[in-house]
Image (cartoon, helix red, strand yellow):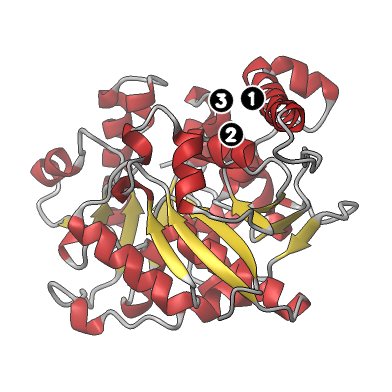
Amino acid sequence: MTNTLKHRIFLVSGPSQVLFLSAALVKDADLNTEVYADILVFSAVAYPKEKKAICEEIAMTVWEWKTIIWLPETNYFDSKDTSGVLSTIFKERPYQIWLCMPYGKVELVFTKHFYSTSIVRYDDGLGTYVIPRTLTELLKTPSFLKKQLNLVVAKSGRFVKDFLTLKRFSLPKLAPKKRYGLFASFVGSTAKNSKQVEVEWHYLKAQLEKFNLHDKAIVQPLEEKTCLILGQYFSLLGFFDREEELNHYKKLCQYLYSEGYTILWKEHPKNRKPFFNELKATFTQIEDFNNYHSSYWPLEVVVKDFNIDLFIATTSTSIVVLDKAFGYTTKSSAPLMIDKLQGADKQVAEILVERLNEEQLINKI
Protein backbone atom coordinates (compact mmCIF):
# COMPACT_ATOMS: atom_id res chain seq x y z
CA MET A 1 0.00 0.00 0.00
CA THR A 2 1.15 3.55 -0.68
CA ASN A 3 0.92 6.64 1.50
CA THR A 4 -1.60 8.14 -0.93
CA LEU A 5 -4.30 5.75 0.28
CA LYS A 6 -6.94 7.05 2.64
CA HIS A 7 -6.59 5.65 6.14
CA ARG A 8 -9.41 4.08 8.11
CA ILE A 9 -9.28 3.22 11.83
CA PHE A 10 -11.33 0.34 13.25
CA LEU A 11 -11.89 0.01 17.00
CA VAL A 12 -12.58 -3.45 18.45
CA SER A 13 -12.35 -4.87 21.94
CA GLY A 14 -12.38 -8.61 21.28
CA PRO A 15 -12.64 -11.50 18.80
CA SER A 16 -16.42 -11.47 18.24
CA GLN A 17 -16.33 -7.81 17.32
CA VAL A 18 -13.65 -8.54 14.73
CA LEU A 19 -15.96 -11.11 13.12
CA PHE A 20 -18.98 -8.79 13.05
CA LEU A 21 -16.82 -5.94 11.76
CA SER A 22 -15.38 -8.11 9.00
CA ALA A 23 -18.85 -8.93 7.67
CA ALA A 24 -19.58 -5.20 7.44
CA LEU A 25 -16.24 -4.61 5.72
CA VAL A 26 -16.96 -7.17 3.00
CA LYS A 27 -20.39 -5.60 2.47
CA ASP A 28 -18.74 -2.18 2.23
CA ALA A 29 -16.25 -3.52 -0.30
CA ASP A 30 -19.13 -4.73 -2.46
CA LEU A 31 -20.63 -1.24 -2.43
CA ASN A 32 -17.41 0.74 -2.71
CA THR A 33 -14.43 -0.28 -4.87
CA GLU A 34 -12.01 2.25 -3.38
CA VAL A 35 -8.93 0.76 -1.68
CA TYR A 36 -7.93 1.96 1.77
CA ALA A 37 -5.09 1.56 4.25
CA ASP A 38 -6.90 -0.04 7.18
CA ILE A 39 -5.68 0.14 10.78
CA LEU A 40 -7.18 -2.23 13.36
CA VAL A 41 -7.02 -1.05 16.99
CA PHE A 42 -7.63 -3.50 19.84
CA SER A 43 -8.89 -1.18 22.54
CA ALA A 44 -9.40 -3.24 25.72
CA VAL A 45 -7.27 -2.51 28.77
CA ALA A 46 -5.51 -5.90 28.65
CA TYR A 47 -5.18 -9.02 26.50
CA PRO A 48 -3.99 -12.30 28.05
CA LYS A 49 -1.46 -14.07 25.82
CA GLU A 50 -3.89 -16.75 24.62
CA LYS A 51 -6.66 -14.24 23.89
CA LYS A 52 -4.27 -11.98 21.99
CA ALA A 53 -3.11 -14.87 19.81
CA ILE A 54 -6.71 -15.82 18.95
CA CYS A 55 -7.68 -12.20 18.26
CA GLU A 56 -4.71 -11.85 15.95
CA GLU A 57 -5.45 -15.09 14.12
CA ILE A 58 -9.06 -14.07 13.54
CA ALA A 59 -8.07 -10.58 12.42
CA MET A 60 -5.49 -11.84 9.91
CA THR A 61 -7.92 -14.43 8.55
CA VAL A 62 -10.86 -12.14 7.82
CA TRP A 63 -9.22 -9.00 6.41
CA GLU A 64 -6.01 -7.41 5.15
CA TRP A 65 -4.77 -4.70 7.52
CA LYS A 66 -2.04 -2.14 7.01
CA THR A 67 -1.24 -2.57 10.69
CA ILE A 68 -2.71 -3.86 13.93
CA ILE A 69 -2.31 -1.74 17.06
CA TRP A 70 -2.71 -3.10 20.60
CA LEU A 71 -3.62 -0.08 22.68
CA PRO A 72 -2.41 -1.62 25.98
CA GLU A 73 1.06 -1.94 24.45
CA THR A 74 1.24 1.82 23.97
CA ASN A 75 1.26 4.07 27.03
CA TYR A 76 -2.36 5.04 26.32
CA PHE A 77 -3.90 3.63 29.51
CA ASP A 78 -1.06 4.97 31.68
CA SER A 79 -1.13 8.48 30.24
CA LYS A 80 -3.10 11.48 31.45
CA ASP A 81 -2.84 12.91 27.94
CA THR A 82 -4.58 10.23 25.88
CA SER A 83 -5.13 12.64 23.00
CA GLY A 84 -1.39 13.27 22.94
CA VAL A 85 -0.78 9.53 22.70
CA LEU A 86 -3.07 9.34 19.67
CA SER A 87 -1.11 12.19 18.05
CA THR A 88 2.04 10.11 18.49
CA ILE A 89 0.52 6.90 17.13
CA PHE A 90 -1.39 8.40 14.20
CA LYS A 91 0.55 10.94 12.19
CA GLU A 92 -2.36 11.89 9.95
CA ARG A 93 -6.09 12.33 10.30
CA PRO A 94 -7.99 9.21 9.19
CA TYR A 95 -10.64 9.29 6.51
CA GLN A 96 -13.06 7.28 8.68
CA ILE A 97 -13.31 5.77 12.15
CA TRP A 98 -15.40 2.61 12.50
CA LEU A 99 -16.78 1.70 15.91
CA CYS A 100 -19.66 -0.12 17.54
CA MET A 101 -19.83 1.58 20.95
CA PRO A 102 -19.89 5.36 20.36
CA TYR A 103 -20.00 6.23 24.06
CA GLY A 104 -17.26 3.93 25.33
CA LYS A 105 -14.31 5.64 27.05
CA VAL A 106 -11.78 4.86 24.33
CA GLU A 107 -14.26 5.58 21.55
CA LEU A 108 -15.02 9.01 23.04
CA VAL A 109 -11.32 9.90 23.12
CA PHE A 110 -10.84 8.83 19.49
CA THR A 111 -13.90 10.67 18.20
CA LYS A 112 -13.03 13.79 20.19
CA HIS A 113 -9.43 13.78 18.96
CA PHE A 114 -10.46 13.16 15.34
CA TYR A 115 -13.59 15.32 15.62
CA SER A 116 -13.74 16.14 11.91
CA THR A 117 -13.40 12.50 10.79
CA SER A 118 -16.50 10.67 9.53
CA ILE A 119 -17.84 8.00 11.88
CA VAL A 120 -19.12 4.65 10.58
CA ARG A 121 -21.02 2.34 12.95
CA TYR A 122 -21.13 -1.46 12.89
CA ASP A 123 -23.11 -3.88 15.05
CA ASP A 124 -21.78 -5.51 18.20
CA GLY A 125 -24.98 -7.43 18.87
CA LEU A 126 -28.61 -6.85 19.72
CA GLY A 127 -27.59 -4.36 22.39
CA THR A 128 -26.65 -1.99 19.56
CA TYR A 129 -30.37 -1.47 18.96
CA VAL A 130 -31.26 -0.67 22.56
CA ILE A 131 -31.46 3.08 22.09
CA PRO A 132 -34.22 5.66 22.58
CA ARG A 133 -36.17 6.16 19.36
CA THR A 134 -38.58 8.91 20.39
CA LEU A 135 -38.30 12.13 22.44
CA THR A 136 -40.30 10.50 25.24
CA GLU A 137 -37.95 7.49 25.34
CA LEU A 138 -34.94 9.82 25.28
CA LEU A 139 -36.24 11.85 28.24
CA LYS A 140 -36.76 8.59 30.16
CA THR A 141 -33.08 7.67 29.70
CA PRO A 142 -31.12 10.68 31.01
CA SER A 143 -27.85 8.72 31.00
CA PHE A 144 -28.10 8.21 27.23
CA LEU A 145 -28.96 11.89 26.69
CA LYS A 146 -26.02 12.88 28.88
CA LYS A 147 -23.64 10.72 26.82
CA GLN A 148 -24.85 12.32 23.59
CA LEU A 149 -24.49 15.83 24.97
CA ASN A 150 -21.02 15.04 26.32
CA LEU A 151 -19.91 13.86 22.89
CA VAL A 152 -21.26 16.97 21.15
CA VAL A 153 -19.68 19.29 23.74
CA ALA A 154 -16.34 17.47 23.59
CA LYS A 155 -16.12 17.62 19.80
CA SER A 156 -17.29 21.22 19.62
CA GLY A 157 -14.91 22.28 22.38
CA ARG A 158 -11.96 20.67 20.65
CA PHE A 159 -12.94 22.35 17.37
CA VAL A 160 -13.10 25.80 19.00
CA LYS A 161 -9.72 25.27 20.69
CA ASP A 162 -8.07 24.24 17.42
CA PHE A 163 -9.72 27.09 15.55
CA LEU A 164 -8.51 29.72 18.02
CA THR A 165 -4.97 28.35 17.99
CA LEU A 166 -5.00 28.09 14.18
CA LYS A 167 -4.33 24.32 14.26
CA ARG A 168 -7.27 23.10 12.23
CA PHE A 169 -10.33 24.54 10.52
CA SER A 170 -12.40 21.42 9.79
CA LEU A 171 -15.90 21.37 11.26
CA PRO A 172 -16.78 18.59 13.74
CA LYS A 173 -18.81 15.62 12.50
CA LEU A 174 -21.60 15.14 15.04
CA ALA A 175 -23.61 12.31 13.46
CA PRO A 176 -22.51 8.95 12.00
CA LYS A 177 -22.06 8.97 8.24
CA LYS A 178 -23.24 5.39 7.84
CA ARG A 179 -24.28 2.39 9.89
CA TYR A 180 -23.76 -1.21 8.84
CA GLY A 181 -26.43 -3.33 10.47
CA LEU A 182 -25.81 -7.07 10.71
CA PHE A 183 -28.83 -7.45 13.01
CA ALA A 184 -30.91 -4.79 11.26
CA SER A 185 -33.12 -7.23 9.38
CA PHE A 186 -33.82 -9.23 12.54
CA VAL A 187 -34.71 -6.16 14.59
CA GLY A 188 -36.61 -4.60 11.68
CA SER A 189 -34.74 -1.31 11.51
CA THR A 190 -33.77 -1.22 7.84
CA ALA A 191 -36.73 0.75 6.51
CA LYS A 192 -36.76 4.54 6.13
CA ASN A 193 -33.18 5.04 7.29
CA SER A 194 -30.85 6.31 4.61
CA LYS A 195 -27.77 5.79 6.79
CA GLN A 196 -28.61 2.17 7.62
CA VAL A 197 -27.02 -0.45 5.36
CA GLU A 198 -28.16 -4.02 5.91
CA VAL A 199 -25.36 -6.57 6.16
CA GLU A 200 -26.92 -9.81 4.97
CA TRP A 201 -26.15 -12.92 7.00
CA HIS A 202 -24.28 -14.64 4.18
CA TYR A 203 -21.44 -12.13 4.66
CA LEU A 204 -20.86 -13.30 8.21
CA LYS A 205 -21.29 -16.97 7.29
CA ALA A 206 -18.61 -16.64 4.59
CA GLN A 207 -16.20 -15.19 7.13
CA LEU A 208 -16.95 -17.94 9.65
CA GLU A 209 -16.40 -20.62 7.01
CA LYS A 210 -12.76 -19.50 6.73
CA PHE A 211 -11.99 -21.16 10.07
CA ASN A 212 -11.37 -24.83 10.77
CA LEU A 213 -10.67 -25.67 14.41
CA HIS A 214 -10.52 -29.44 14.10
CA ASP A 215 -6.78 -29.48 14.77
CA LYS A 216 -7.20 -27.13 17.76
CA ALA A 217 -9.70 -29.28 19.66
CA ILE A 218 -8.74 -30.16 23.22
CA VAL A 219 -11.04 -33.21 23.21
CA GLN A 220 -13.30 -34.58 20.50
CA PRO A 221 -16.94 -33.39 20.24
CA LEU A 222 -19.74 -35.55 21.60
CA GLU A 223 -21.85 -37.67 19.27
CA GLU A 224 -24.99 -37.92 21.43
CA LYS A 225 -28.13 -35.82 21.10
CA THR A 226 -26.70 -32.62 22.53
CA CYS A 227 -27.92 -29.25 23.80
CA LEU A 228 -25.56 -26.38 24.51
CA ILE A 229 -26.74 -23.96 27.20
CA LEU A 230 -25.17 -20.49 27.06
CA GLY A 231 -24.95 -19.27 30.63
CA GLN A 232 -25.25 -15.59 31.46
CA TYR A 233 -24.61 -13.45 34.54
CA PHE A 234 -27.74 -11.47 35.35
CA SER A 235 -27.40 -11.97 39.11
CA LEU A 236 -23.99 -10.28 39.09
CA LEU A 237 -25.74 -7.18 37.77
CA GLY A 238 -28.05 -7.21 40.75
CA PHE A 239 -31.30 -8.05 38.93
CA PHE A 240 -31.96 -10.94 41.33
CA ASP A 241 -29.87 -13.15 43.58
CA ARG A 242 -27.45 -15.75 42.27
CA GLU A 243 -29.38 -18.69 43.73
CA GLU A 244 -32.45 -17.71 41.74
CA GLU A 245 -30.49 -17.61 38.50
CA LEU A 246 -28.81 -20.93 39.33
CA ASN A 247 -32.23 -22.51 39.92
CA HIS A 248 -33.33 -21.30 36.50
CA TYR A 249 -30.45 -23.20 34.89
CA LYS A 250 -31.12 -26.28 37.01
CA LYS A 251 -34.72 -26.35 35.78
CA LEU A 252 -33.51 -26.03 32.19
CA CYS A 253 -31.11 -28.95 32.69
CA GLN A 254 -33.80 -31.11 34.30
CA TYR A 255 -36.15 -30.42 31.38
CA LEU A 256 -33.46 -31.21 28.80
CA TYR A 257 -32.46 -34.47 30.50
CA SER A 258 -36.09 -35.54 30.47
CA GLU A 259 -36.05 -34.91 26.71
CA GLY A 260 -33.00 -37.16 26.26
CA TYR A 261 -30.33 -34.51 25.69
CA THR A 262 -26.70 -34.63 26.72
CA ILE A 263 -25.92 -31.15 28.04
CA LEU A 264 -22.95 -28.92 27.35
CA TRP A 265 -22.61 -25.81 29.50
CA LYS A 266 -20.82 -22.66 28.35
CA GLU A 267 -20.03 -20.19 31.08
CA HIS A 268 -20.37 -16.52 30.22
CA PRO A 269 -16.80 -15.11 29.98
CA LYS A 270 -17.69 -12.17 32.23
CA ASN A 271 -19.15 -14.32 34.98
CA ARG A 272 -16.75 -14.07 37.92
CA LYS A 273 -18.74 -16.66 39.93
CA PRO A 274 -19.24 -19.59 37.52
CA PHE A 275 -22.30 -21.82 37.81
CA PHE A 276 -20.74 -24.95 36.33
CA ASN A 277 -19.45 -26.64 39.50
CA GLU A 278 -22.85 -26.35 41.17
CA LEU A 279 -24.61 -27.67 38.08
CA LYS A 280 -22.13 -30.55 37.86
CA ALA A 281 -22.82 -31.45 41.48
CA THR A 282 -26.51 -31.89 40.61
CA PHE A 283 -26.21 -33.25 37.07
CA THR A 284 -23.15 -35.48 36.83
CA GLN A 285 -23.41 -35.92 33.06
CA ILE A 286 -23.23 -32.22 32.22
CA GLU A 287 -20.00 -31.24 30.43
CA ASP A 288 -18.03 -27.99 30.33
CA PHE A 289 -18.01 -26.69 26.75
CA ASN A 290 -14.76 -24.82 27.38
CA ASN A 291 -13.02 -28.21 27.65
CA TYR A 292 -13.38 -28.55 23.88
CA HIS A 293 -11.79 -25.30 22.78
CA SER A 294 -10.28 -22.22 24.35
CA SER A 295 -13.02 -20.00 25.77
CA TYR A 296 -11.52 -17.08 23.85
CA TRP A 297 -12.71 -18.48 20.54
CA PRO A 298 -16.09 -16.97 19.56
CA LEU A 299 -18.86 -19.54 19.88
CA GLU A 300 -19.87 -19.06 16.25
CA VAL A 301 -16.43 -20.25 15.10
CA VAL A 302 -16.28 -23.26 17.41
CA VAL A 303 -19.71 -24.79 16.82
CA LYS A 304 -19.19 -25.18 13.07
CA ASP A 305 -17.21 -28.30 13.93
CA PHE A 306 -19.75 -29.72 16.37
CA ASN A 307 -22.87 -31.77 15.94
CA ILE A 308 -25.06 -29.82 18.38
CA ASP A 309 -28.80 -30.31 18.06
CA LEU A 310 -30.06 -27.40 20.16
CA PHE A 311 -28.74 -24.11 21.55
CA ILE A 312 -30.45 -22.39 24.48
CA ALA A 313 -29.76 -19.00 26.06
CA THR A 314 -31.75 -16.11 27.50
CA THR A 315 -30.61 -12.95 25.71
CA SER A 316 -27.33 -13.98 24.06
CA THR A 317 -26.72 -12.58 20.58
CA SER A 318 -25.59 -16.07 19.54
CA ILE A 319 -29.23 -17.20 19.50
CA VAL A 320 -29.77 -15.03 16.46
CA VAL A 321 -26.37 -15.54 14.80
CA LEU A 322 -26.45 -19.35 14.91
CA ASP A 323 -29.98 -19.39 13.52
CA LYS A 324 -29.46 -16.86 10.75
CA ALA A 325 -25.93 -17.78 9.66
CA PHE A 326 -26.14 -21.59 9.93
CA GLY A 327 -29.80 -22.49 10.38
CA TYR A 328 -29.13 -24.15 13.74
CA THR A 329 -32.01 -24.80 16.14
CA THR A 330 -31.95 -22.13 18.84
CA LYS A 331 -34.27 -21.24 21.70
CA SER A 332 -34.51 -18.41 24.20
CA SER A 333 -35.66 -18.62 27.80
CA ALA A 334 -36.29 -14.85 27.81
CA PRO A 335 -40.04 -15.28 28.50
CA LEU A 336 -39.17 -16.97 31.82
CA MET A 337 -36.86 -14.19 33.01
CA ILE A 338 -38.04 -11.02 31.28
CA ASP A 339 -40.02 -9.70 34.25
CA LYS A 340 -36.91 -9.84 36.44
CA LEU A 341 -34.51 -8.16 34.01
CA GLN A 342 -33.76 -4.46 33.89
CA GLY A 343 -32.33 -1.85 31.55
CA ALA A 344 -30.68 -2.94 28.32
CA ASP A 345 -30.97 -6.64 29.18
CA LYS A 346 -34.73 -6.32 29.52
CA GLN A 347 -34.95 -4.43 26.23
CA VAL A 348 -32.93 -7.10 24.43
CA ALA A 349 -35.24 -9.74 25.93
CA GLU A 350 -38.22 -7.80 24.60
CA ILE A 351 -36.67 -7.72 21.12
CA LEU A 352 -36.18 -11.50 21.20
CA VAL A 353 -39.69 -12.22 22.46
CA GLU A 354 -41.09 -10.02 19.71
CA ARG A 355 -38.91 -11.18 16.81
CA LEU A 356 -38.22 -14.89 17.42
CA ASN A 357 -40.61 -17.53 16.15
CA GLU A 358 -42.99 -19.03 18.71
CA GLU A 359 -41.18 -22.39 18.64
CA GLN A 360 -37.94 -20.60 19.57
CA LEU A 361 -39.36 -19.27 22.84
CA ILE A 362 -39.36 -21.31 26.05
CA ASN A 363 -42.45 -20.23 27.94
CA LYS A 364 -42.45 -22.93 30.61
CA ILE A 365 -40.24 -25.72 31.93
* Residue identifier under label 3: 343
- The reply, left or right, for residue 81 in relation to residue 77 is right
Distance between mark 2 and mark 1 Cα atoms: 6 Å
Q: Which of 23 and 200 is in front in this view?
A: 23
Quadrant location of the N terminus in the rendered image: bottom right
Tell me the number on the disc at residue 18. none
Task: Report the label total.
Answer: 3
Q: How crowded is mark 3: few (under 14 residues within 10 Å), some or many (20 or more)?
A: few
Q: Residue furthest front?
A: 166
Vertical arrangement, residue 54 with respect to residue 163, above or below: below
* Callout 3–callout 2 Cβ contact below 8 Å: no
Does residue 100 appear to the left or right of 300 in the view shown?
right
In the image, residue 78 above or below residue 144 = below
- Please tell me whether residue 223 is drawn above or below residue 48 in the rendered image: below
The x, y position of residue 153, in whole percent, is 71, 23
Q: Mark 2 points at which residue?
A: 103
Measured in 3D between alpha carbons, the distance from the residue under mark 3 to the one under mark 2, in whole angstroms, is 17 Å
Q: In this view, does 155 lie to the left or right of 214?
A: right
From the viewer's side, name the closer residue of 278 and 303: 303
In this view, the residue in front, 83 or 343, is: 83
* Of the pair 139 and 264, the residue shown nearer to us: 139
Residue 146, horizontal then vertical, whole percent: 66, 19
The residue that appears at 37% across and 62% down in the rendered structure is 298
Q: Where is residue 288 in the image (x, y as percent from the top left)?
A: 18, 56
Say which label, 1 or 3, has the lower sequence index: 1
Dot 1 surroundings within 10 Å: few (below 14), some, or many (20 or more)? some
- Helix, strand or loop at label 1? It is helix
Q: Which amino acid does label 3 sit on?
A: Gly
- Residue corresponding to mark 1: 147
Q: Mark 1 and mark 3: span between their CA atoms?
A: 16 Å
Q: What residue type is labelled 1?
A: Lys
Q: Do the residues labelled 2 and 1 touch (CB within 8 Å)?
A: yes
